[in-house]
Amino acid sequence: INSLIEQKKAFNKSNKNIIVFKIQIYNGNETQAYAIKRNFEADFPEYRTKIIYKTPEWKTHAGNFRTRLEADRALNIVKEKYAGAIVLEAKI
C-alpha cells in the first residue's frame, strides 16, 4: 500500500492540472471572433487573448487569472466595453 501511495504522489506531482480563470468576451462566428479579438487587444493590451473553436462556435477568451477574485476584478473593467463578458474556469 505504501508503494502505491508513493506512486500516486509522484504521479500527482508530474501531472498537475492547474485551474485558471478566463474572461470570455465573445461566443459566435469566426469573423466576428477575430474582429472582437483585435478590438479587445487595442482596448486592453495588458491581457493576452486567444481564439478557441468548440463546435459549432468560436470563442474569444482573455487572460489567465490565478484566482476568481482577480478575474472578477478584471471583468468589472472589461464589462464597461464588452457587456456580455463572463468569467470561465479552465484547466491547463
Image: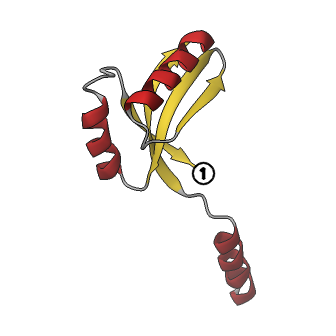
Colour setup of the view? secondary structure
In the image, residue 14 sits, relative to residue 79, either above or below, namely: below
Q: What kind of residue is marked 1?
A: Ile
Image position, residue 7 (x, y; %): 73, 79
Residue 42 horizontal side relative to residue 74, left or right? right
Q: How dense is the environment of label 1, judged by Cα within 10 Å: few (below 14), some, or many (20 and up)? A: few
Count of labels shown? 1
In the image, residue 49 sits, relative to residue 68, either above or below, namely: above
Residue pointed to by mark 1? 92
Residue 76 horizontal side relative to residue 25, left or right? left
Residue 61 seen in render: yes
Image position, residue 17 (x, y; %): 60, 58
Residue 55 horizontal side relative to residue 73, left or right? right
In the picture, residue 46 is in which quadrant?
top left
**Near-viewer residue (84 or 88):** 84
Residue at x 70%, y 78% (from the top left corner): 10
Mark 1: which secondary structure? Answer: loop
Q: Quadrant of the N terminus?
A: bottom right
Residue at x 52%, y 27% (from the top left corner): 60
Image position, residue 28 (x, y; %): 53, 13
In the picture, residue 33 is in which quadrant?
top right
